[in-house]
Amino acid sequence: MKNIKFYIETIGCQMNVNDSDKMAEVLSEKGCLRTQDMSQADIVIVNTCSVRFSAEHKAYSLLGRLKEQKDINPDLIIGVTGCMAEYAAKEIKSRCKYVDFVLGAKKVDLFSETVSKYISVQPESKYKQENSEVFKYITIMRGCSNFCSYCIVPHVRGPEVSIDYNQILKEVNETIDAGTKEIILLGQNVNSYNYNGVNFTQLLQKISQIDKVQRIRFMTNHPKDFSDELIDEIATNKKICRHIHLPLQSGSDNILKAMNRKYTYEQYKNLYEKIKNKIPDINITSDIIIGFPGETDSDFQDTFNASRQLQFGGLFIFKYSPRPKTYAAKLKNTVPLETIKKRHTLLLEDSNIISKNINEKYIDKTIEVLVENVNDGIAEARNSQNIKIFFDTKENLKGKTVNVKITKVLPNSMSGILQ
Ligand code: SAM
Ligand code: SF4
């Protein structure tokens, strides 16, 4: 009997990558084989995101291509999962009648049951896929209760729920035993993790006590919940990577208030400086939204100045996208798209210069990196600060920690020579 092949397209954030991994595990346990070639697949899962309109557009254009594939192969099974499947199930079903099932983000636990209706377990090939990934995302909490006024996440993923730490530790142990070196803990606001009185700092301590865990990363952090206790833990715990993603969103207090972020720029700056003082080798990156309703030239200038003043190691700059169900989508004082584009380019160009300048300090320095992949003689690795590093090698160094002398830097990556 021929193995059923499956393909998963993940759209959006790391939370979705983790859900896709879980669905891949379910399908592998049922004897199906993962393929990276969508045209060869018998089952295609489109794991959607709805944080920005562009992610939804991407999902519909992929579904359009899948219709052509299904016209040629009517046995093809198509499933749509994730955030968009949660709140726009009706629309997906009516626009794409050829889709076999739509399963929202809140029902990801029902994936096994749902997919079983379309495939039978193939006994001769029943196996659990070996996990040999260098790093693995592990979800520690679901949903979000913060209701930032622009954000769809609380509306589609529901309120924040922390996962039992015993379950998290079990998952960490399993993945580490299978060869994973680095654990990346995921949640919309990991700083407010709390399960039966165990907070995020205590969870980090429990995970770092597992011998074979080499590196721990986590994201995302909300500035309002970043405690001194957590800063001290990162400063003293060598297994925790020297990288913190700390979204600012805007440098203007008016906009931060309208966004319901619950901090002022001054409070953010104080936290930023406290972290930098206590952990000098930390790399802090951030998110910015350009063009939130009511953003004036002066508000934008505040954001631009904040980026210059704080000198982030990396900045993800998003154009504001009105999302259904959110408070901000009802605001009338929208910013023209042309203005948003202009401000986006200005900030992007300036922040790229800043990140590149920061990386210049690595030139001629030898640093430790963990190799994530080797393809065609080029290794892709990452340092503790989460900067991508490329170097030439003839060896298969995947999963190994090696030293590299940095010879060239760009805003978001560096390259060097293996030592
Ligand atoms: N929970 C995380 C936090 O508070 O930082 C981030 C989650 S969100 C999926 C990732 C980023 O997308 C946010 O930090 C924000 O910058 C951006 N984002 C969210 N909603 C957006 C919207 N409606 N338009 C543009 N960017 C948005
Ligand atoms: Fe969205 Fe704000 Fe929650 Fe992040 S903290 S997921 S931006 S509501």
Image (cartoon, rainbow, N blue to C red):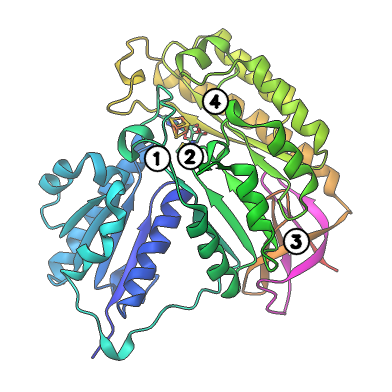
The quadrant where ligand 2 appears is: top left
The spot of residue 289 in percent (x, y) is 50, 26
Q: Is residue 37 visible?
A: no
Q: Position of residue 277 (x, y in %)?
A: 82, 31
Quarter-of-image position of residue 229: top right
Residue 188 is marked as: 2
Q: Quadrant of residue 299?
A: top right
Counting from the top left corner in percent of width and height, residue 251 is at 60, 18
Q: Is residue 248 above or below residue 166?
A: above
Labelled pair 1, 3 in contact (Cβ < 8 Å): no
Give the residue drawn at x 50%, y 9%: 296
Badge nearest the viewer, 3 or 2: 2
Q: Is residue 410 magenta?
A: yes
Q: Amino acid at mark 4?
A: Gln
The answer to whether mark 3 and mark 2 are in CB contact below 8 A is no
Residue at disc 1, secondary structure: loop
Image-based side of 384 in relation to 86, left or right: right
Q: Which label's residue is closer to the chain start, 4 or 2?
A: 2
Residue 315 can be seen in this image: yes
Q: Which residues are magenta?
A: 391-415
Mark 3–mark 4 CB contact (< 8 Å): no
- Check disc 1 and report the residue beneath it: 143
Of mark 1 and mark 4, the one earlier in the sequence is 1
Residue at (52, 9) in percent of width and height: 254
Mark 3 C-beta to ligand 1 under 8 Å: no
- Does the residue at mark 2 contact the one at mark 1 (Cβ under 8 Å)? yes
Task: Give me the disc on residue 249.
Answer: 4
| Residue indicated by mark 3 | 369
Q: Nearer the viewer, mark 1 or mark 3?
A: 1
